[in-house]
Amino acid sequence: MEQRKRPGGDGGLGYYTSWEKSKSNGCIYCGKSATTREHTPSKTFLIEPYPENLPTIPACFACNNGYSEDEKYVACFLDLLKSQVYLDYTQQEQTKLRLLKDEKLNKTLQEQIWMENGKVYFKPDEKRILRILRKLARGHAGFELDYINFDNTEIEVWYEFVFNMSQNDIEEFDDIPVYSLYPEVGSRGMYLIQNLSTGAAYTFAGWIDVQNGQYRYQVSYDNNSNIVVKIVIFEFLYCRVVLE
């Protein structure tokens, strides 16, 4: 999938955010030379048949492989927990296969998700979840808006499970931001509306549905010009990441 550069942006940023096999690239996660490309989001959160033309960003071999185990953990944790919370939900086949092949992960999840007196209890590995949510957000912000920042301390993450959210919470989260046009806007998920009478221009940040029911995200700006990435995984985990 072709990356759209933001108008007036620094073309040099594409070194870290746009994969081109015939040119040199920099890893979006660590800044080192990139020799591979990575899908954003990772296919770990999708099911076959995978969507065509998934966005890709440059990554070094170490980073491309260094998140794999944590991504698998997060995907399996979410799917297993969802199957325990909603009895009418069928666990994904890829989750069953992953747990069958990985006894250590299976044991870990059995210890982190359990039933007592008909109620579901869970205790996730917070560090692993936050690590992957930051990683996913950086990938989306990089591909959509050429964003790069190698400092994780400037990334604010909030997430919640849908069963802990009210209908009003969900509607507010799903809202499409509208604001005056920023000169950097160039994302596939952003749309410009202009009043021909007054000349006023506004930007709408829509949702990008990577795979129905599996993964969707939205990239926008807040009132402080920070990039905001919203992610919904399995329509079960809602996440908001602010990149300063």
Image (cartoon, helix red, strand yellow):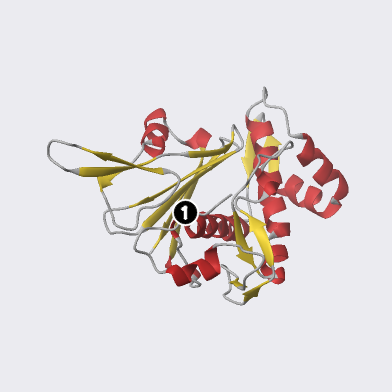
Q: Which element is circle 1 on?
A: loop
Residue denoted by label 1:
4
In the foreground, 166 or 235: 235
Q: Amino acid at mark 1?
A: Arg
Is 63 left, or right, of 163 in this rendering? right
Q: Quadrant of residue 215?
A: top right
Farthest residue to the top: give it: 88
Is 11 left, or right, of 139 in this rendering? left
Is 7 left, or right, of 136 in this rendering? left
Is 90 left, or right, of 197 in this rendering? right
Percent from the top left, x then y, of residue 82?
64, 35
Farthest residue to the bottom: give it: 32
Residue at 67% from the left image edge and 54% from the top image edge: 71
In the foreground, 204 or 76: 204
- Residue 153 visible in rendering: no
Residue 124 lies, with reference to residue 195, above or below; the image says below
Disc 1 packing (10 Å; few <14; some 14–19; many ≥20): some
- Residue 115 visible in rendering: yes
Residue at 61% from the left image edge and 77% from the top image edge: 32
Residue at 17% from the left image edge and 43% from the top image edge: 200
Percent from the top left, x then y, of residue 141?
47, 57
